[in-house]
Image (cartoon, helix red, strand yellow):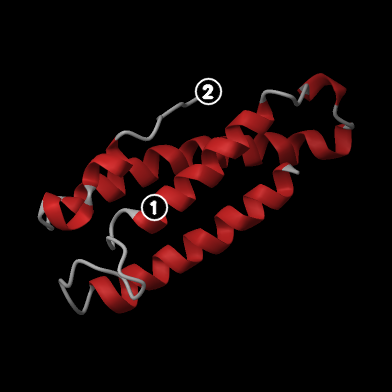
Amino acid sequence: MLANVHGAFRFRRQHWSMVKQYIMNNTKYPRATGGTPITTWLPNQIGACLEMCQDLQKYIKIEELPHEVRDDYIDLRDEINAEIDRLFKEVLSIQSSYTHDDQEVGQFQTREKIIN
């Protein structure tokens, strides 16, 4: 299940990357194509995936994993934790260039930031 949720995270991270590259770099319009705040909705979806990944990690006992997957799991765990920190810093920085009314920043800023 962790691999599946992480796959959804990777998809959403790629989508976010394209939004930044092709939309945000070319316009300051505060809404995405679906009308959602451009700096809030997609980062919240990414955050939800990362938080779910962290929740799933609570059920994984590293000592019970087969040796051939332990290093992969450790790399994945470290990536998830680093991505949470990176996402918070990035989004808070980007949101500062938009008005708070346009972006509903409270939705993102109240996400639980848990780093294990």
Side of 98 relative to 51 (left or right): left
Quarter of the N terminus within the rendering = top right
Percent across and percent down for residue 27 are: 18, 77
Q: Residue at x 82, y 20 (%)?
A: 63
Disc nearest the viewer among 2 and 1: 1
| Residue 54 higher or lower than 116, as above or below | below
Q: Amino acid at mark 1?
A: Pro
Q: Amino acid at mark 2?
A: Asn
Please tell me which of labels 2 and 1 falls first in the chain. Answer: 1
Side of 71 relative to 44 (left or right): right
Residue 116 tag number: 2
Secondary structure of the residue carrying numbered label 1: helix
**How would you rate the neighbour count of disc 2 (Cα within 10 Å): few for under 14, some for 14-19, many for 20 or more?**
few
Contact flag, marks 2 and 1 (Cβ < 8 Å): no
Q: Residue at x 19, y 52 (%)?
A: 95
Q: Which residue is mark 1?
A: 43
**Cα distance, mark 2 to mark 1?**
20 Å
Percent across and percent down for residue 91 are: 28, 49
